[in-house]
Amino acid sequence: MNLSNIVQRGWEFVGKGDFDALILDYTDDMTFVMPGQEDILRGRRTFRKALNNLGGLLPPGFEITELRQIETGNEVVSIVEWKSDKVAASQLSVLFQFEGDKIYEERWFVDTEQWKNLF
């Protein structure tokens, strides 16, 4: 399985709310860097607990409208087109870095001013 397929499968798990399956593709000591690059979660168990509150981390009405993967070396970038209750269309990107076939870092890149104004 190529790395892009692992990332795509992860997005599908998120869509289904199957977070226990999602975290199996992460290393135990993984790092998750949230929008704004200031909030950092460390460790798969901490990440899993945070996923229980995913609805509160995303803007109201958040919906992914298109998803593309770009893979090079041990990295995959997801280009995410999305909308929400307050935004008709926008984009963000997520960088996934791998050790073998496991994600050791996930880092979100968003327009932080736009993101803050959605809550």
Image: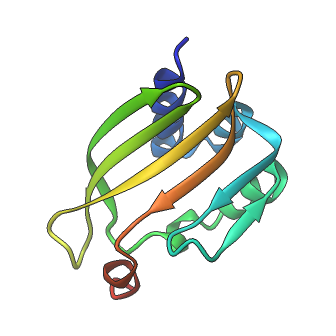
Question: Relative to 89, is 107 on the left or the right?
Answer: right
User: In the rendering, at what x and y percent does residue 22 appear?
Assistant: 64, 38
- In this picture, is 119 found above or below 55? below
Question: 11 or 61: which is nearer to us?
Answer: 11
Q: Residue, x 51% and y 75% (percent of image)? A: 36
Residue extending farthest to the top is 1
User: In the rendering, at what x and y percent does residue 77 appear?
Assistant: 43, 41
**Quarter the C terminus occupies:** bottom left
Q: Residue, x 46% and y 25% (percent of image)? A: 4
Residue extending farthest to the left is 88
Q: Residue, x 22% and y 79% (percent of image)? A: 86
User: In the rendering, at what x and y percent does residue 56 appear?
Assistant: 53, 74
Number of numbered discs: 0
Q: Residue, x 57% and y 66% (percent of image)? A: 34
User: In the rendering, at what x and y percent does residue 13 appear?
Assistant: 53, 37
Q: Which colour scheme is used?
A: rainbow
Question: Relative to 74, is 50 on the left or the right?
Answer: right
- In this picture, is 17 found above or below 56? above
- In this picture, is 70 found above or below 77? above
Q: In which quarter of the image is residue 50?
A: bottom right
Question: Relative to 75, is 71 on the left or the right?
Answer: left
Question: 12 or 73: which is nearer to us?
Answer: 73
**Quarter the N terminus occupies:** top right
Q: In which quarter of the image is residue 75?
A: top right
